[in-house]
Image (tube, rainbow, N blue to C red):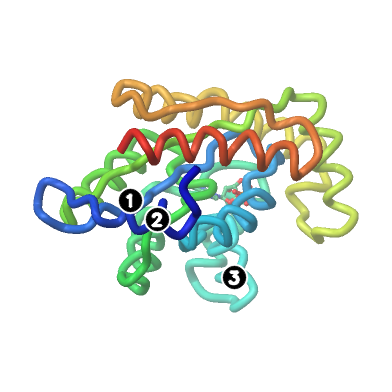
Amino acid sequence: MLSLESFFSKFFKKKNLTGQTAMINLILFGPPGSGKGTQAAQLVEKYNLLHISTGDLFRSEIGNKTALGIEAKSYMDKGALVPDEVTINMLKKKVKENPDVKGYIFDGFPRTIPQAEALDTMLMADGQAITSLVTLNVDDEEIVARLLNRAKTSGRSDDANEGVIRNRLSVYKETTAVVARHYDKKDKTHTINGVGTIDEVFGRLTEVIDRALVAV
Ligand code: AMP
């Protein structure tokens, strides 16, 4: 068994086609309430990556009462997606502000094919790519129960209304799920069972991520 340290030094010695060190770029995928944010917080520590949640970025803009936040809120309150251009520009800004990282965990992004294409293009410009997309699989009724429960502490109005939650689930199925197929074509996708304790789900996630990293 390799220690984590020697595993990383082995991994980071790998260079990509342009001679740059390969980053670890993970997409944590799955419907709202599937546990992406919770798991990302732990994955960040294990793999030393930067967690970028577009939902969190929008909520921060809303908190700061910026024009971007005010625009985003009108979509978020309905459970609709914020337009691609706004979302992609915000994401790019966050990535540009953090160039010296070992890689990123994208959470809640990309949610559309144009977002995925913009992400691929941005990474490719630096000789990088998505390493792996992992979907947390959780069924609809469990999601609705989880989000209504989360609303008690999250203060998120989009968690408190069952109609809005069901709309977010429809958007996921109709618009977002195809993003996994986009990376499927590149043989980069994995699906795990997202139901269980935080540690159980984390164990399943790290198993597939570690396998994907060895295969890089
Ligand atoms: P989340 O915190 O990921 O559940 O996102 C909350 C809300 O923010 C979503 O329902 C959307 O309205 C908006 N949002 C977050 N990420 C994106 C994205 N990548 N594209 C469009 N809208 C997004």
Whole-angstrom CA distance, mark 2 to mark 1, is 5 Å
- Look at discs 1 and 3 and give the one toward the viewer: 1
Number of the front mark, 3 or 2: 2
Q: In the image as oriented, which residue stretches furthest toward the front?
A: 1
Q: CA distance from mark 1 to mark 3?
A: 34 Å
Element type at mark 1: helix
Which amino acid, by three-letter code, is at mark 2? Answer: Phe
The span from disc 3 to disc 2 (Cα, nearest Å) is 32 Å
Residue position for label 3: 60
Type of residue at label 3?
Ser
Where disc 3 sits, the SS reads: helix
The quarter of the image holding the C terminus is: top left
Q: Which x, y percent locates residue 94? A: 40, 67
Residue designated by label 2? 8
Q: Are marks 2 and 1 in contact (CB under 8 Å)?
A: yes
Residue 16 versus residue 32: which sits nearer the camera? 16
Vertical placement of residue 38 versus 117, above or below: below
Residue type at the position of mark 1: Phe
| Mark closest to the chain's N terminus, 1 or 3 | 1
Query: Residue extending furthest left?
Result: 18
